[in-house]
Amino acid sequence: MMKTTPNHLEGILLVDKEVGSTSFRIVSELRKLTKIKKIGHAGTLDPFASGVMVMLIGPTYTKKSNDFLCHDKQYEALVHLGIATDSYDVDGTPIHTSSLIPTFSDVAQAISLFQGEILQIPPMFSAKKIQGKKLYDLARQGIEVKREPCKVKVSIQLIEYTYPFIKLIVDCSKGTYIRSLAHDLGQHLKTGAHLKELKRTKSGSFSLQDCIKQENLRDLMYNINPHMIQL
């Protein structure tokens, strides 16, 4: 393991992102804490989501971001049936409601259709680019464009169903949109649905229990050295 000093700190730091925060805010907080400008991450999380952020500190590690982006991920997800939103998540505008209440068997059967390799259409509210334009920029202008389905791999465990909420654990490959899974489940169940809560519990071999709380980064006396990982 490399030796580190406060003025020359490079490595991986695992941070448990807070609900309501952004990936950019974590980078900003780390820059203030470490006085290092070259800081990146291996996969963003939406503001409403929480959990594992793999932060890459220093030029040696920011250059390796693509190596970590390809890792599989695991999430805890809470799907809200009966309300579909334009962004497929809790931050979006409701566009459809339904009073239909699926049975447990209906929900289990629907989930069985989203296992293994599946084709998934990216949501309009996403950073994916089409012809050089980010989809969420177009979505904010009220423009919807055709998106080609992408092949992803998922394994979904049904943890609990108490209408209108479905609690899931999702293991998935790079590029999987959990928001799209929630939306597609709602479509199949004919109720509409959106993603109410999302927590990333694993990113590759890195787990939530190995993370430090984001709030620690705002303490300028906090020592991150014992939590740094060098590979």
Image (spheres, rainbow, N blue to C red):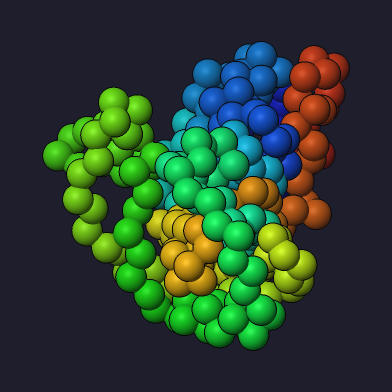
24 vs 8, left or right, is left
Report x, y in % for residue 189.
Answer: 51, 71
Q: Residue at x 47, y 49 (%)?
A: 96
Q: Residue at x 29, y 26 (%)?
A: 141
Residue 109 at least partly seen: yes
The foreground one among 82 and 75 is 82
Instruction: Using the rendered view, name the quadrant where residue 166 is placed.
Output: bottom right
Q: Residue furthest left?
A: 131
The foreground one among 196 and 154 is 196
The foreground one among 131 and 100 is 100
Report x, y in % for residue 4.
Answer: 70, 32
Q: Residue furthest front?
A: 99
Vertical position of residue 173 compared to residue 123: above or below: below
Vertical position of residue 26 compared to residue 1: above or below: above
Instruction: Using the rendered view, name the quadrant where residue 67 is placed.
Output: bottom left
50 vs 141, left or right, is right
210 vs 112, left or right, is right
Report x, y in % for residue 163.
Answer: 72, 65
Instruction: Using the rendered view, name the quadrant where residue 53 is placed.
Output: top right
Vertical position of residue 84 compared to residue 225: above or below: below
